[in-house]
Image (cartoon, grey):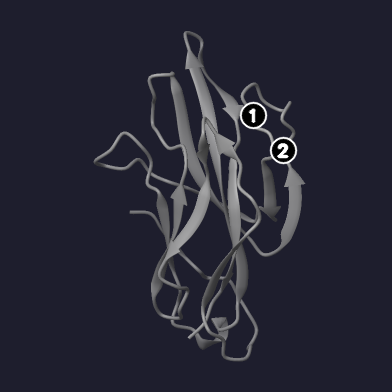
Amino acid sequence: MRTFSLLLLSGALAAQSAAFTPFGTACAFQAQTLAIGNQGLPVIGTSFQITYAGPNFTFSSGQQIARPFLVLGLGTSVTPIPATLLPQQPVGCQGFITPDVLLDTPVNPTQPEYENFVTINVPSSPTLAGFLFHAQWMTLIQQCGFSGCGLAAIPTSDAATVLVGF
């Protein structure tokens, strides 16, 4: 299981209720629309999961690999990914957040895919109340063949604003 501790500094802020609020529009790859979700909320002293839905396989019959990565950021910034960037790049994909942290997902021990979540541990620090960050999934699609594997597409999910609370 992959975990990430939220060890970012924040000033003393007013007490807040925890929230996980999706925004933006995801794109699709091979008829699978990427999506961000959550299990639990970012409450001080607990953990919660940011979940992924979309293409996810260590190696498919089409000789492809689809590996999801969780991007965390402190700000928002719309960055379109041109459909002409990569050979199989879908139309309408974009980043919605500043890419400050990139977290990979390990291989699922029971399936031929990667884990579809990242666990975030929120420290027991009252100063984190009101801390705001953003999250979005991007998946690196590799096309493999006789000469190896190469990057073929970067589909993206919708994003979410995450508010740490009590």
Distance (Cα) linking label 1 and label 2: 8 Å
Q: Where is residue 20 in the image (x, y as percent from the top left)?
A: 53, 69
Name the one closer to the observer, 56 or 124: 56
Badge 2 marks a residue whose secondary structure is: loop
Q: Where is residue 32 in the image (x, y as percent from the top left)?
A: 50, 37
Which of the 4 image quadrants contains residue 83? top right
Q: Where is residue 133 in the image (x, y as percent from the top left)?
A: 61, 67
Lateral position of residue 107 relative to residue 54, left or right: left
Residue to which mark 1 is pinned:
89
Q: Residue at x 46, y 81 (%)?
A: 44
Type of amino acid under label 1: Gln
* Residue 103 in the image: above or below residue 113: below
Badge 1 marks a residue whose secondary structure is: loop
* Residue 144 in the image: above or below residue 66: above
Q: Position of residue 124 (x, y in %)?
A: 44, 82
Lateral position of residue 57 relative to residue 23, left or right: left
Type of amino acid under label 2: Ile
Q: Residue furthest front?
A: 31
> Circles 1 and 2: CB distance less than 8 Å?
yes
Residue to which mark 2 is pinned:
81
* Residue 103 in the image: above or below residue 66: below
* Residue 114 in the image: above or below residue 134: above
